[in-house]
Image (spheres, coloured by chain):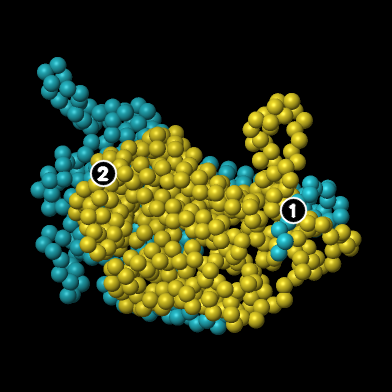
Amino acid sequence: MSGHLTYQPQNAFMQWMERRLPIAGLVYSSFVVYPTPRNLNYWWTFGGILSFMLGVQIITGVVLAMHYTANVDLAFNSVEQIMRDVNYGWLLRYLHANGASMFFLAAYIHMFRGMYYGSYKEPREVLWILGVILLLLMIMTGFMGYVLPWGQMSFWAATVITNLFSAIPLVGESIVTWLWGGFSVGNPTLKRFYSLHYLLPFVIAGVVVLHVWALHMVGQNNPTGIEPKTDRDTVAFTPYATIKDGFFMVVFCILFAWFVFYIPNFLGHPDNYIPANPAVTPTHIVPEWYYLPFYAILRAIPNKLLGVIALGASIVILAFLPWLDTSKVRSARYRPLYRQFFWTFVIVCIGLGWLGSKPPEGNYVLFARIFTVYYFAYFLVILPLLGKIEKTKPLPNSIAESVLLEGKPIGAPAPPPPLAKA
Amino acid sequence: MVIARTLALAAALAAFTAPARAQEHDTATPPMNKWSFAGPFGKYDRGQLQRGFKVYREVCQVCHGLKLVAFRTLAEPGGPGFTTAQAAAIAAEYQVPAEPDDQGEVKPRPARLADYFPPPFPNEQAARARYNAVPPDLSVIAKARGYERGFPRWVGDMFTQYQEQGVDYITALLQGYQDSPPAGVTLPPGNFYNKYFPGHGIAMPPPLTDQRVEYTDGAPMTVEQYAKDISAFLMWTAEPHLEARKRIGMQVVIFLIVLSGLLYFTKKKVWHEVKLHPEKLTPRPPTEYPRT
């Protein structure tokens, strides 16, 4: 769904440039005249917010890397040095640490939005899968970043997570030794995590380019889940989407600033201000909040290997979502049953997150198991069956019609548009 | 929503039943204190930081280091507010190893502003040999300790900006000693009973007694006051830029609120015609929509 390339520069230099490298024309067609559905709500602003957060993480991260030292004896103190002696080092570090949380928060909202409105369905499967790859890359990057301050939680999280690979039969132990670069989590581990933590964000940026490219091939989904048919269904990206995205990005930044400036350690764990000590195990080893649902799934299963498989499957299964959901209707707006199961799924994910923060004992394990069963049943049983049995509500004829029908009557009645010959 | 409601109910049930079992061997919850540095306008009380520093020097310092704290920071803005001369005089009371001399020998010299607080022990083994435990360094201890807030209090903490778990815990711990453990509790040899310490057996003997540190500013010379002052001082050593952070934070948040207001009205203006007069929109270049 591309607008025709209509960028005609007036400036002589831009004309010269456009004949050689049409980059201004590309920007013009992708971010200025690009048609975007007119009925997008604020849940659609999280894509822009995510790009912004990636930028924040890369910029703060590059500066932090100038001051950080990846060595088991120096890492903890070098982070404290940043907090104390680097000009605005405390700001950079708190932006980066809380930025990771904001990044995940925005990503989860972005994904739930995609699921609610069926944005993963034909023709947006590749767009969705690229998103799942981005999530995987984010999880790896975030995990390795958490190890770098080399506090108690850093060290023990690294130990627990790398040890998961030992569940693999036959080669598990060898893989773990290879990951560590030694026979326990140590200096080689820290250094390779640092190296990869610097590399992966640029891989993420590359996949983001593919994600946006794929998005611009198929166009954005919208709350009705039906495709735009005429110009009455869309508005130009600039100024309409730009100003709306910009406004909500600033609102999101208020939340971000609240955490950074007032409760910067709220999402962290006090134990990570204790330097790493291989001889002392913390009472409860807890990952960052954004991994808790997956952690709960891992611990819900008594067998280590099966637990690791379930953990991996809980993420990988998302990539198959376009084919697991058999319904022809995209948006939950017109799927009354799906809506119930969807919100239950959201509650289950939040519940798993809460259970992941609790010790694996008693009722916590029981509920983690019930919720894990629902998590997988949602994808493997409910969605495939629901598409076959659900009676969906009638879809509107067009996006414009759905907007005009809602709410109050709209000013001047729009003249019936001549149907554009496609 | 029947399924959703059932599951929510089940989760709530789990939340109520599980902590009841955990309570059995639970530690006491530290009381919340009023701190001058809490909240969005928080600032350290200079007098309190100076008193806390006095407590540190006369009581804690024997066993606990402050290796991440440089003497110069005692005179930096947002801290205890010593003058540079005072900070230099304090530094000179400490001995640090000098640079090797012509003979290659390392002799001690008085510390300067640029130096850091020297450690009380040359290494962990020395500490363990003397006290049978390693007294932790106190530089970031106020952020390295805390206590479980539990649901739903932790949700409220996001809005009330409660970030003082660490200082509240330290204040409580210093006052939480009991002469004899409750019946049925046996402590490891050499340990003391403290109702706020996880596991209750703490190797540190009760450090504070009334009148132990002399205050000249009229503040009460009680264990309670000492505990609060040293905790506040340790909050500063853990978070020396807290005042700047909260001050800049207020500026940033006000700026963002104003900017978001302006952007909101700009957005309304821009979208006005889309909403009300779609026929007035400027014509766009032709677009090919996919046939569905």
Residue A196 place in picture, x, y as percent: 37, 45
Q: How many marks?
A: 2
- Rendered hue of chain B is cyan
Q: Nearer the viewer, residue A168 or A84?
A: A168
Task: For residue B169, say whether it is visible.
Answer: no
Q: Nearer the viewer, residue A339 or A219?
A: A219
Residue B93 place in picture, x, y as percent: 24, 31
- How many neighbours does mark 2 have within 10 angstroms: few (below 14), some (14-19), or many (20 or more)? some
Residue A406 place in picture, x, y as percent: 77, 69
Residue sitting at x 69%, y 44%: A29
Task: For residue B95, say whether it is visible.
Answer: yes
The label shown at residue A188 is 2
Residue sitting at x 33%, y 69%: A307
For the N terminus of chain B, which image quadrant?
bottom right
- How many neighbours does mark 1 have within 10 angstroms: few (below 14), some (14-19), or many (20 or more)? some
Residue sitting at x 69%, y 53%: A1
Return the chain for callout 2: A
Which label lies toward us, 1 or 2?
1
Disc 2 marks a residue whose amino acid type is: Pro
Q: CA distance from mark 1 to mark 2?
A: 55 Å
Q: Quadrant of residue A419?
A: bottom right
Q: Which chain is yellow?
A: A
For the C terminus of chain B, which image quadrant?
bottom right
Q: Secondary structure at mark 1?
A: loop
Return the chain for callout 1: B
Disc 1 marks a residue whose amino acid type is: Glu
From the image, tell me which residue sits under label 1.
B288
Q: Secondary structure at mark 2?
A: helix
